[in-house]
Image (spheres, rainbow, N blue to C red):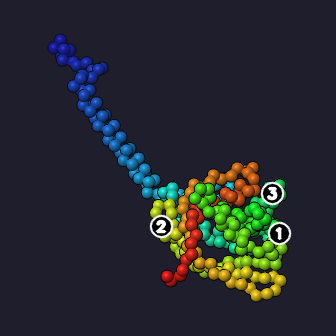
C-alpha cells in the first residue's frame, strides 16, 4: 500500500526550462513568419502605387480630372500646342467686341457673365493701343530681363488700325497647321505654325490675306497658384492664361518645306 502511494506523480504547475525553450522557439518562428508575410504584402501594395501612372481626382467644385505623375518641367504635347493656338487666337482675332471668355472676367464689380462690351483697347503708351484680347495674350510672352513682351506689344500696336475699335475692320486668323512640339532640351520646345490672317473691311473694300508662318520657342515656367475666391477679375484672367505653366521665349519666321 505504501509502495503504491509513493508511485503517484503530482501534476506540474510550472514548466521546466527544457520545456520552455522549444515553445519560445516555435513562437519566435511564427512571429517572424507573420512579419515576413506582412512585409511582403506592404511591398506589393507600395509597388502597385509606384506603377500607377494616372490618378482620378474630383475637385470641390465638382470638376473631375485625371492626373498623371510627370517631371515638373514636363508638358503634354497638346498643352504646348494649345498655348500657341491660344496666343494666336487672342492676338489676331479682332471683332471690336471683347471676347466672351475675357468678358466674363472684366464685368464691372467683378461679376461673372458674358457681355457684348465694345473693345476700347488697351493703352500701351505714346497714344498706341492694342485690342484687349491681344493685351491679355501678351502675358504668354516672356517678360522681364531678356523677355520681349513689350516689344511684341509695340509691334502689334503698329499693325492694329484704329478702325478696329469702332468695328470698321475685323481680323480672323485661320491656322492651317501646328506641328508637334520638338523638344530642344528638358522643359523647352519648338512648334511651327502655318496660318493666314484675314482682314475684313466692314465699310467696303477688298479683304486682305496675310500669311503668318512662325516658329515658336516655348519653355516651362512655374504654374501659378489658383486665385482666391475674392481675387480681382484681372488676377483670374491672368491665371486662366498662364495656368499651363508655359511662356513663349522666341518667335521667328518659319519657311515651310525648307
In the orientation shown, which residue stands out farthest toward the bottom? 206
In this rendering, position of residue 33 left or right of residue 212: left
Q: Which residue is drawn at 24% across and 28% down?
A: 21
Q: Which of 8 and 18 is in front in this view?
A: 18
Sort mark 1 into few (<14), some (14-19) or many (20+) by Cα contacts within 10 Å: some
Q: Mark 3 points at which residue?
A: 111
Q: Residue 142 has which mark? A: none
Q: Mark 2 points at which residue?
A: 183
Question: Which of the 4 image quarters holds residue 160?
Answer: bottom right
Q: Residue 118 has which mark? A: 1
Can you give x and y, in whole percent of width and height, for residue 228 in the image?
70, 50
Can you give x and y, in whole percent of width and height, for residue 201 in the image?
78, 82
Q: Residue at x 71, y 74 (%)?
A: 159
Mark 1 lies on a secondary structure that is loop
Question: Which of the 4 image quarters holds residue 198?
Answer: bottom right
Marks 2 and 1 close (CB-CB < 8 Å): no
Amino acid at each position: 500500500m505504501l509502495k503504491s502511494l509513493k508511485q503517484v506523480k503530482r501534476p506540474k504547475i510550472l514548466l521546466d526550462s527544457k520545456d520552455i525553450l522549444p515553445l519560445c522557439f516555435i513562437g519566435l518562428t511564427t512571429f517572424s513568419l507573420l512579419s515576413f508575410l506582412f512585409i511582403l504584402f506592404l511591398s506589393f501594395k507600395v509597388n502597385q502605387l509606384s506603377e500607377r501612372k494616372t490618378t482620378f481626382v474630383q475637385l470641390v467644385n465638382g470638376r473631375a480630372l485625371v492626373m498623371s505623375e510627370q517631371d515638373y518641367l514636363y508638358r503634354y504635347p497638346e498643352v504646348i500646342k494649345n498655348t500657341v493656338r491660344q496666343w494666336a487666337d487672342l492676338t489676331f482675332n479682332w471683332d471690336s467686341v471683347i471676347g466672351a471668355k475675357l468678358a466674363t472676367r472684366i464685368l464691372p464689380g467683378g461679376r461673372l457673365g458674358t457681355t457684348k462690351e465694345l473693345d476700347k483697347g488697351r493703352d500701351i503708351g505714346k497714344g498706341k493701343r492694342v485690342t484687349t484680347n491681344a493685351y491679355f495674350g501678351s502675358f504668354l510672352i516672356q517678360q522681364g530681363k531678356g523677355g520681349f513682351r513689350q516689344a511684341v506689344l509695340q509691334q502689334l500696336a503698329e499693325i492694329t488700325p484704329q478702325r478696329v475699335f469702332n468695328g470698321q475692320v475685323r481680323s480672323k486668323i485661320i491656322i492651317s497647321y501646328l506641328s508637334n512640339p520638338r523638344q530642344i532640351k528638358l522643359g523647352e520646345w519648338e512648334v511651327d505654325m502655318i496660318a493666314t490672317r484675314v482682314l475684313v473691311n466692314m465699310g467696303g473694300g477688298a479683304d486682305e490675306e496675310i500669311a503668318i508662318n512662325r516658329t515658336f520657342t516655348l519653355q516651362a515656367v512655374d504654374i501659378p497658384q489658383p486665385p482666391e475666391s475674392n481675387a480681382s477679375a484681372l488676377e483670374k484672367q491672368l491665371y486662366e492664361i498662364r495656368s499651363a505653366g508655359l511662356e513663349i521665349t522666341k518667335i521667328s519666321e518659319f519657311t515651310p518645306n525648307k
